[in-house]
Image (tube, helix red, strand yellow):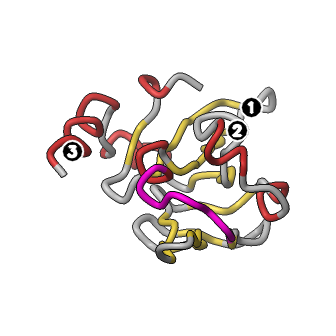
């Protein structure tokens, strides 16, 4: 995915909304390249179960590096539709393709408009540069 078309949280998650062939809205959520670089050597990830409810701003999982354990926060309210379970066996896609194969979860949002309140790419990059 093109990062310039995504929305971002101040906790370094990204989200992309799409409409399925059935007309449902689906939000793909991932962790940004900036966050992954800061965490460095990733060793473990915990992701939610399909069907779990997530709430905007609340943790839905965690990622662990040799330096720290960090919570993963949901950018919107909804129900987990799909989980990238392959990451629990191989974390490389997180580092190698954070905006593609490294996606974390797909959520059926209960309020897709929440995405509009998130930062666009330029605002997110500015926040990262300002530290």
Which of the marked residues, 3 or 1, is nearer the chain's N terminus?
A: 1
Q: Which residues are magenta?
A: 37-45
- Whole-angstrom CA distance, mark 3 to mark 2, is 32 Å
**SS for callout 1:** loop
Q: Residue at x 56, y 69 (%)?
A: 65
Task: Tell me whether the residue at label 3 lies in contact with that at label 1, contact meaning CB atoms closer than 8 angstroms.
Answer: no
Q: CA distance from mark 2 to mark 1?
A: 5 Å
The answer to which of marks 3 and 2 sits earlier in the sequence is 2
Residue 84 visible in the shown view = yes
List the residue tagged with mark 3. Answer: 127
Q: Residue at x 79, y 26 (%)?
A: 21
Query: Tag 2's secondary structure?
Result: loop
Please give the label number shown on residue 5.
Answer: none
Q: Residues within 10 Å of mark 1 (few under 14, many from 20)?
A: few
Asked if residue 53 is among those painted magenta in the image, a careful observer would answer no
Q: Residues within 10 Å of mark 2 (few under 14, many from 20)?
A: few
Q: Are marks 2 and 1 in contact (CB under 8 Å)?
A: yes
Q: Judge depth for marks 3 and 2 and give the one in front.
A: 3
Q: With 23 as the anchor, is 11 left or right in this view?
A: left
Query: Residue 120 at what x, y percent from top left?
Result: 32, 33
Up-down relation of residue 38 to residue 103 (above or below): below
Q: Which residue is mark 2?
A: 24
Q: Please name the residue that numbered disc 1 is placed on.
A: 20
Q: 115 or 102: nearer the eye?
A: 102
């Amino acid at each position: 995915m093109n990062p310039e078309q995504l929305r971002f949280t101040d906790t370094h998650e990204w989200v992309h909304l799409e409409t399925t062939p059935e007309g449902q809205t689906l939000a793909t959520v991932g962790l940004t390249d900036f966050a992954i670089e800061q965490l460095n050597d990733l060793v473990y990830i915990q992701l939610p179960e399909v069907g779990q409810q997530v709430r905007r701003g609340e943790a839905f999982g965690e990622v662990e590096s040799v330096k720290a354990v960090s919570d993963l926060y949901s950018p919107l309210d909804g129900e987990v539709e799909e989980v990238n379970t392959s990451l629990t066996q191989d974390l490389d896609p997180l580092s190698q393709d954070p905006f593609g194969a490294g996606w974390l979860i797909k959520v059926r949002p209960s309020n897709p408009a929440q995405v509009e309140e998130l930062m666009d790419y330029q605002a997110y990059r500015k926040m990262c540069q300002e530290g």
